[in-house]
Image (cartoon, rainbow, N blue to C red):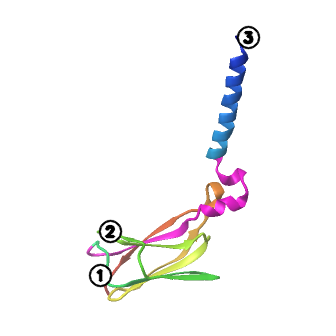
Amino acid sequence: MRPFGVNRVSATASKAKIAVIAAAVFVGCDIFDPSDCTAVGGYGLQIAVSDSVLGTPPLVPIVVEISDASYSETLSEPDSTNAIEMIFFGARERTGTYSVTVAAEGYSAWSRNDVEVRRAGSCDQIQLTRLAARLRRP
């Protein structure tokens, strides 16, 4: 038979180990090698495109152009489509101040300048900036 209090010390030590492991999980990759954070990934921009009058996705091809001082990207295939809009994602793992232009045949071009994408959260993740491009016919 063990003396009184021995199991209590062991249980307390076990609880302390569990607390340290749980804290490491909740803190995120900040306590590990910074290269562990590269697996987090993330897009900086989400552009939802729809017809401003009909409230549905345009039935023509759409081209989304994203650019900043040192980077440009052209998107022509939506990442998803629903009954209201086509959704494009861009600026993967990139911060910056962007110009975004959406072009579609039969519609006036839509554009926004000075669209900021920043880092935030654990592992310095990319903060998603959402834009709604409501296209108008000329």
| Label 1: few (<14), some (14–19) or many (≥20) C-alpha neighbours in 10 Å | few
110 on left or right of 66:
left
- At label 1, which amino acid type do we have? Leu
Q: Which of 8 and 88 is in front in this view?
A: 8
Q: What stretch is highlighted in magenta?
A: 27-54
Distance of label 2 from label 3 (alpha carbons)? 67 Å
Label 1 vs 3, first from the N-terminus? 3
Residue 107 lies, with reference to residue 123, above or below; the image says below
Distance of label 1 from label 3 (alpha carbons)? 79 Å
Q: Which mark is residue 82?
A: 2
Label 2 vs 3, first from the N-terminus? 3
Residue 121: name its quadrant: bottom right
Residue 47 in magenta stretch: yes
Q: Number of marks in the image?
A: 3
Q: Name the residue under label 1.
A: 59
Q: Is mark 2 on a helix, strand or loop?
A: loop
- At label 2, which amino acid type do we have? Asn
The residue positioned 32% from the left and 68% from the top of the image is 82
Distance of label 1 from label 2 (alpha carbons)? 12 Å
Question: Residue 13, how many percent across, how many down?
Answer: 71, 28
Q: Name the residue under label 3.
A: 3
| Label 2: few (<14), some (14–19) or many (≥20) C-alpha neighbours in 10 Å | few
